[in-house]
Image (cartoon, coloured by chain):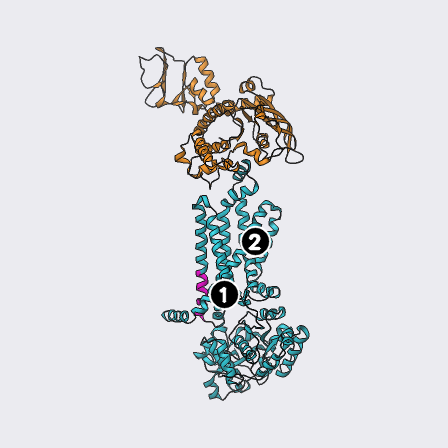
Chain colours: A cyan, B orange
Amino acid sequence: MANFMESYVSLFQERSDLLFNSFWEHVQLSLVSLLIAVAIALPIGILLTRYNRYSEWIIGFAAVLQTIPSLALLGFLVLFAGIGTTPAIIALTAYALLPILRNTYTGIREVDPAIVEAARGMGMNSYRSLMKIELPLAMQTIMAGIRTSMVLIVGTATLAALVGGGGLGQIIMTGIQRTNNEYILFGALPAALLAIVLDVILRLTERGTKRNRHASSKPIIAVVAIALVIVLIQPVVSMFKDESDLVIGGKLGPEPPILANMYKLLIEEETDLNVEVIAPLGATNVNFNALIVGDVDIYPEFSGTVLADLLNEEEFSYDEEESYQEARDGIYEEYGFHFLEPMGFQNTYALAMPRELAEELEVSTISDLMPYTNELSVGFTFEFMDREDGYAGFEDVYEFSFSDVTSIDVSTRYQAISNGSIDISDVFSTDPQLVEYDMVVLEDDEDLFPPYQAAPLVTNVALQQHPEIEEILNQLAGIGTIEEISELNFRVDLEDEDPEEVARDFLVEQGLLDN
Amino acid sequence: MSEEMRGTVSVITFNQVDKSFTEDRKAVKGLSFTIERGEFFVLIGPSGCGKTTTLKMINRLIDASSGTITINGSNHTDVNMHELRWNIGYVLQQIALFPHLTVAENIAVVPEMKKWKQDDIQKRVNELLELVGMDPDTYRDRLPADLSGGQQQRVGVARALAGDPDIILMDEPFSALDPLVREQLQKDIKKLQQRIKKTIVFVTHDMNEATLLGDRIGMMEAGVLLQVGTADELKRNPATPAVEAFIGRSFEQKNLSLKESLIPTDRSEYIRTHRDEQRVTVQFIINEHGEWITTFNDHNELEAMIPIDASSSVKSAFELLESSHLPALPVQENGKVIGSVSYKDLARALV
């Protein structure tokens, strides 16, 4: 525990800039979304009490919005709103509508009918009765709805990172990606703190409206004004940012941001273009949708993903050259995107073992393992056990199997190898832990695993406007081995280095960039 | 409303007014009656008879389906509805003070809508609180929840009077209060009305309340106004058997409460354990167990006289008083005397 605290504190000292920026973005995202949600749901909720024929439909619609899985909604919104804060704000607002709408509606409807009748009987018109009697009496219920929405928003806003919306989600996602608990808490604790602080502010506002009877709306106006000021002081980063000439995306994990920065460095080295990297940016669907709407011009993609996920091919070649060509031609035909020349490494399933053991047994390919099937203990992840391009199809291709195979969880496989409880596991061929635990990837000499070659996926528009980037990015063709890339990933993931610096070092080393 | 209009004697006139909430059932039908200026007019009838509907048609909380309602000489649908209501005070059965507003703010609601000056409003609030018997300095800034039920309805009455309306509507205003408080408020509202001379339309289902308060009483049943007249007229010349039945029922209900009208043994001037030779009034002598032994009147022992049972009706108590020529009777329960009852006690129970 003391150890954990220490590393937490040192993380805080090293990355306080990142924390403050992310925190600020998170506050702005949350407040903008909450203000918009209140501005939409409060008047509608009030209107529904006047025309309650439609109330069930509209509240039902808000409820449906809330049931849409957030990841799906965000990926989908990229198609309409692009990447950045806009889709995040739309999604957060959509989630926040229901509690405010429902509590406004029921809060007003549940005001004692006799009191409403008294107000009408004394000659108040509908508006006056609403402002002077019904809203103040429903305020507690309405504020409870707003507080519920606020907690919902602050929590869900962590997903904004997936669409380039920034916020504390960037830190949390990185932590999850690296299974690094300090990092997760580094982002999650401020988010929780933010939720608590905002809740307290809203509670105090509510109490203030009650205590100060003669100015019942003053505290609310004050809080809304402060919120507006916070939102407007420093507009949410990417909303009003200078347009760059090219935007490069990239998925979660250490590798895509490194590759994206390589593209950026090379392009900026040889042209006058202003290039922006927005990575990590969610999963495949977010990056690809962003490419479709043109918010992102380039992102590093894998040939296997293009074939299996983007083109939905069920069968494709396992030969490196052929599968790359299939992917390149397919994605151009269907979407008009250019899949440029692939680099030298593959990020695919692989079998790996400690270097020491491999050298001792003189093993370098999977076929070399055949004599040791009874001696080696093997641990495979659940998904790998099940896949045709995993252990399920292993025996058909290699014509042998292991006698001692156990199932293990993804997160524990490296520990299991390092403490000696297993000798071999499935990995991704550029995992940074391969460097950390000094392991070697065995060559897939019989082509069990489909090729996952990394190459820039570029829109047609970008390439037409800047035809020179094709040649610039193709300098990366054939460059980088799995060992080299694992090393880069290790530096970012476990040494917490800046992806841009890591990319620069690599390019300099490769002679593609002057020092 | 103009001074000229104030001059007319009748304030509210219903002319052939119908109201139906559903197509096949009329809540009220063929209502035609007139309420005079300064009159305390009571609408009475069993629940569901349409009396509250009739009341709410006056301030248009409910609009008539057909017929006309005239207020101060003009059809009340020709006037701005909200302004009409500013000039008609409204007191609800549920009291319904605005719980988030202070007593003063509750009373100020209509004057504020009438855009009175703040000074005038505050003066008016104090004046009204005094009028309903509440100390302004003590109660102005309290919230309704800090008041007793009786105090709340006093504020309810003050709130209805605040805009200096011509007419005040009261929808069973005292029925939610406990009997003692109700009695006090009934007395106070009667006095108040005699002082301020407002036209009051008052709905109740309690004949005693109607008798006590109403200058005239309108008796309704099943949406129809059966008879309008003073309490005396209704009792002596009921227009229909239904009126007679309702009035009869009302008193019978009251007759069940002999036990409530008696004076308990320890406070009764008639009951004692030993005869007092000096007294000439009737004396009921009881033993240490509370059992009746004998009765003395004018130095004579009345052996024939026996106590009346507590479960007897007021009517039979009254008859027994008449036949015995005594000012009071001992009342017993389970063989023990629990108190005495006199003409005075019975009369109090009736009002």
Identify the residue shown where x is 44% and y is 69%.
A17
Q: Using the rendered view, name the quadrant where residue B139 is placed.
A: top left
Residue A432 in view in this figure: no
Residue A64 higher or lower than B44, as above or below: below
- Residue nearest the observer in this picture, A63 or A381: A63
Indicate the position of residue A428 as horizontal and vertical percent values.
Answer: 53, 78
Say which residue label 2 marks. A40
Identify the residue shown where x is 51% and y is 22%.
B211
Of callouts 2 and 1, which one flags the residue occurring earlier in the amino acid sequence? 2
Kind of residue at disc 2: Ile
Residue A294 higher or lower than A97, as above or below: below
Residue B349 higher or lower than B145, as above or below: above
Q: Is residue A336 magenta?
A: no
Q: Using the rendered view, name the quadrant where residue A474 is placed.
A: bottom right
Looking at the magenta stretch, what is its main secondary structure? helix
Indicate the position of residue A514 as horizontal and vertical percent values.
Answer: 51, 84
Residue range (magenta): A180-193
Residues packed near mark 1 inside 10 Å, few (<14), some (14 to 19) or many (20 plus): many
